[in-house]
């Protein structure tokens, strides 16, 4: 399974890790994905959603 948010489409970012001597080596920042059951078209579905998207959905539900 790829590390992609089902709602926002967020993916892992890449860049450089910098040591104390500023030597650069490649690294990855993964998305904080959570397995959540969400109601889609009236049916509950298990989705992998980023924590940020989950927080936004919960805030919209409260209103």
Image (spheres, grey):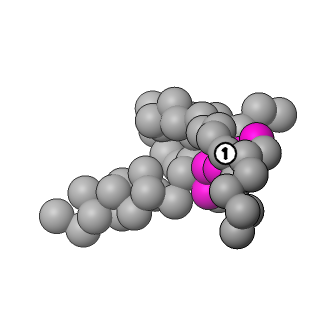
Q: Which residue is nearer to you in this view: 15 or 47?
A: 15
Q: Report how many numbered discs are placed on residues in the image.
A: 1
Q: What's the residue at 43%, 51% (across, down)?
A: 53
Q: Is residue 52 above or below residue 24?
A: below
| Residues in magenta, as a range | 26-32
Is residue 32 visible in the rendered image? The answer is: yes
Residue for point 49% across, 46% down: 39
Q: Which is more toward the observer, 19 or 41?
A: 19
**Residue under numbered circle 1:** 16
Taking depth in this image into account, of 37 and 28 the one nearest to the observer is 28
Which residue is drawn at the image coordinates 25% and 57% (left, top)? 60
**Residue 58, position as x, y percentages in the image:** 36, 63
Position in image of residue 22 (x %, y %): 67, 56
Q: Is residue 12 left or right of residue 52?
A: right
The location of residue 8, given as percent across then percent down, is 45, 35
**Image height check: is 40 above or below 57?**
above
Query: Is residue 16 highlighted in magenta?
Result: no
Name the residue at 54% across, 51% down. 50
């Amino acid at each position: 399974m790829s590390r992609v948010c089902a709602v926002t489409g967020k993916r892992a970012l890449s860049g450089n890790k910098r040591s104390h001597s500023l030597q650069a080596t490649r690294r990855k920042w993964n998305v904080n994905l959570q397995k959540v059951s969400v109601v889609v078209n009236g049916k509950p579905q298990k989705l992998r959603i980023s924590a940020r998207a989950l927080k936004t959905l919960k805030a919209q539900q409260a209103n």
